[in-house]
Amino acid sequence: MNNIIDSQSGDRLSFFKLFTERKYRVLIPIIQRDYAQGRKSSTEVRKTFLNALYKYLDEGIPNRDLDFVYGSLNKVDGITDFIPLDGQQRLTTLFLLHWYLFQISDNADKKNLFTSALFNEGKSMFTYETRSSSEDFCDALVSNEIDFKNLIENSLSKTIENTSWYFLSWKNDPTIQSMLTMLDAIHNKFANRADFFELLLDNENPIITFLFLNLKDFELTDDLYIKMNSRGKPLTPFENFKAKFEQYLGNAETERNFTLKFDANTEKEVSLKEYFSYNIDTKWANLFWNYRALQNRSKDDIDDTFDDELMNFIRVIFTNQYASTTDASQKDKDESLEYLLGTSVGKKNKDYSDVLSFNKYEELNALSKDGVHYLIDALNCFTNGNDKINLYLSDEYKFFFDEKKTFKNALKHEFESNQERICFHAYMRFLISNKDNVEGISEWMRVIHNLTHPENTVIDSASEVSSVIKTIESLIPYSNDILEYLKSNPEIASFSSWQVQEEKIKSHLIKKSDKWRHKIESAEKHGYFNGQIGFVLEFSGIIDYFNSNKNCDWDNQNDTMYFENFSEYVEKASLVFEDNYDNRKNNKNFVFERAVLTKGNYLTNASQNRKNLLSTNLVKNNIKRDHSWKRLLRITNDEVWKKKRLLVKQVFDDNRFNSDDLANSLESICKDKTNTWKDFLITNPNLIRYCNQGFIRFGNEKDIRLYGESQSNHTHVEMYTYHLWKQYFEVNKESFKPFKKVYYYEIKSIDDDACIVLEGFCHNKIHYHIYIYYCNNDNLPNPYEIAFGKSKGENIPEKYGDDIKTVLKQTDFEWNQEYEGYFYTSDNSDNILDKIHQLNNYLLKL
């Protein structure tokens, strides 16, 4: 730029005074970015700014400053151009507001004054150099008037786009499109306030002003344009948040004192705002600098910022603080909490964003004095000079809480579960509360992990998150010696009662000796148990003692006995319930489920007649949560559940149970007979294997269906015939000639009957089939049924060949009019097999 001139700086000016008093032309330079306040993605910024302008004009108080506007002055051909470095967005919006109010005003004198100031020889005195189209649009806008009585669909932008002077090519200019969006917003806000026009043009007592600074006075150069705008990027969400948040802090009430320490000998008492502003740019910035996500950016996109990480951290703090105070309930959902957590409910909001602005926090009522204090305390407790966060838990406790991983997830706002979020909150609160003594942090995080693990306590909903966080807040005063507090038998809400009871009992044992501590913690770290080992305490007799005495203060001899019992059951359980539960090498052919069935019916109830075999570890349909061995083994007081738990103990106590040869020892237990329906599942693991989700339908002992999935509308089979199929038919398909095709017919309706099918036999051009059913609810005398019938055509005895009817008579088949076929029934599956072979032998001779 040439011909840079000096001018008075630091003056308070209105937008109109730039043209009337200073006689400037406002020229947005080529190097500036496009107009951004009108972008469709900037709805909140646009709304906030227009609300402020409206409020200022409505109140009519002079000199409401919009901060600084600065740039350089350049004189060319007698015209002085003001070239803004900072203020482009505000100036453009003010230009559009002036133009709009000019259009709707009836004050002819003021309108002439405006035209003479903003229009010079067919050119607008406010213009853009970024694109020639932007410049042309500004000229056209100032040169033409709009008929506001006949707006198309009440849309100012559509009306402008429909004028003869609007070029279709302008749709490709982002600045013009942003201006049109802003004009629509202005129209919606200011349509009935034509009186504001005179206020904007008042040079004596201007309402909306800014402080004008000349770039040259501050020895700034054109290089600054390059540094600020060469990439054309707007301010980051954090920069916008920070500016408004610091304003908020300037008016925030606090009873705390804040001191800045600049060096070893210099301290200064400062305001809350000053404390935050200084630290966020210094020591706190150092912390987040270490976690900026450079590894996730392309070479061309490395900007060395940590704004996203910091914004996510702030969201975690404000969300958890809000959760600790809200009265959220399952019945009446707290929409603010849903939004802050980013739940599926929250994300259904039309304006949902993963990046929350200051205004959004205000709208959600998520800003509070306690939240601000929490944020400052959390930033201080994590700050570690120029390094990443301090680590307080030893490697042996990483199972319970991984500080590194969880902190990084917080900075991405990508917690693996609600449990991880809650554990992070408990961790931060501990550090803040016990900053001078953190010796108890490992035990605290172990207990919190055990209480909050998704398989130990359900924390699915926003209200459950809130409830648990409130409970953790109540525990924080005791966090540095949580075991001693648990020993006092306090009432603890929100967590599963059985897990709370387990933690109380374990606190007595851990306090007894290090051997108990090491053995308990080792058991808790088992990948299947994840802190829930109450059943081992029960099997060992410890729970009975505790319930009787309210403590574990036994003598040394009993201590040895209980410890040995506990250790033995831990070893057995750890082998049976393997870490890699989805691939249990010790449970080949469901040998454990079958072994427990020999002791009794352990199946858990689902809905209606459905039960579950606990044979899978699937997450879907809440199977892992509601129908697992871990679910059955919870130490609830329900006698039915306790009876089922003790069936597992009976297997562990069976003298054939051998830890060194587990699978074979369990198979030996499976040889026991119950003489009930359970024997079919015990002897034939294929029946359990069919149940992909572990579900069966148990109407009664003679009405059992195995579900391929979870419901009867998926494929399912009848247990007794499927046993026959897997045990005899499937493995010997070739032995059922003359029938060429042998298969099992699965069904998808509770009203249908599954069966074994033999078909493909044709004699004298008549096709025949065999269906084998097990049915205890029809009019036939026995449940095992062989139905012989025609596959095609009319199915009456007269249509059967005489030689076929002779064979059927020889093999004791009788015609059944109700079911239209020849039937043989028996209460014994062996008889059915014998009869099929007998019949086939006769048929082969035809």
Image (tube, helix red, strand yellow):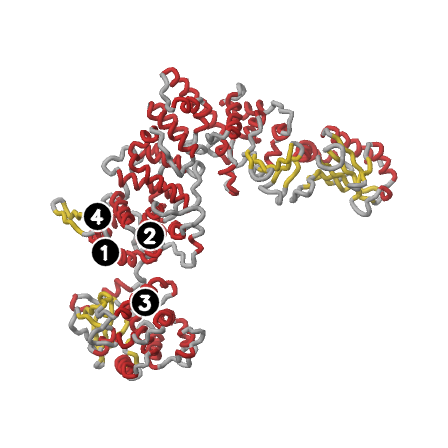
Give x and y (percent) for residue 672: 60, 22
Which amino acid lies under the numbered mark 1 shown in the image of this protein?
A: Asn
Q: Mark 2 or mark 1, which has the lower sequence index?
A: 1
Give x and y (percent) for residue 729: 70, 34
Which residue lies at the image location 29% right of the left edge and 48% below the top edge?
371
In the picture as drawn, the residue positioned furthest to the top comes out as 557
Of 764 and 1, the residue lying toward us = 764
| Residue receiving disc 1 | 251
Q: Mark 1 or mark 3, which has the lower sequence index?
A: 3
Of 668 and 93, the residue lying toward us = 93
Using the rendered image of the protein, determine whether residue 71 is visible from the camera's viewpoint: no
Which residue lies at the image location 64% right of the left edge and 29% below the top edge?
677
* Quadrant showing the C terminus: top right
Q: Does residue 72 appear left or right of residue 822 in this picture?
A: left
Q: Mark 4 to mark 1: distance in Å? A: 13 Å
Q: Mark 4 or mark 3, which has the lower sequence index?
A: 3
Number of marks present in the image shown: 4
Q: Which mark is residue 50?
A: 3
Q: Which mark is residue 212?
A: none
Q: Does residue 577 appear left or right of residue 282 in this picture?
A: right
Q: Are marks 4 and 2 in contact (CB under 8 Å)?
A: no
Give x and y (percent) for residue 142: 32, 79
Q: Is label 4 or label 3 in front?
A: 4
Toward which corner of the image does residue 437 lie, by quadrant? top left
Q: Mark 3 or mark 2, which has the lower sequence index?
A: 3
Q: Which mark is residue 366?
A: 2
Q: Residues within 10 Å of mark 2 (few under 14, many from 20)?
A: many
Q: Which mark is residue 255?
A: 4
From this view, report whether residue 761 is shown above or below residue 29: above
Q: Residues within 10 Å of mark 4 (few under 14, many from 20)?
A: few
Instruction: Label 4: state its secondary structure.
Output: loop
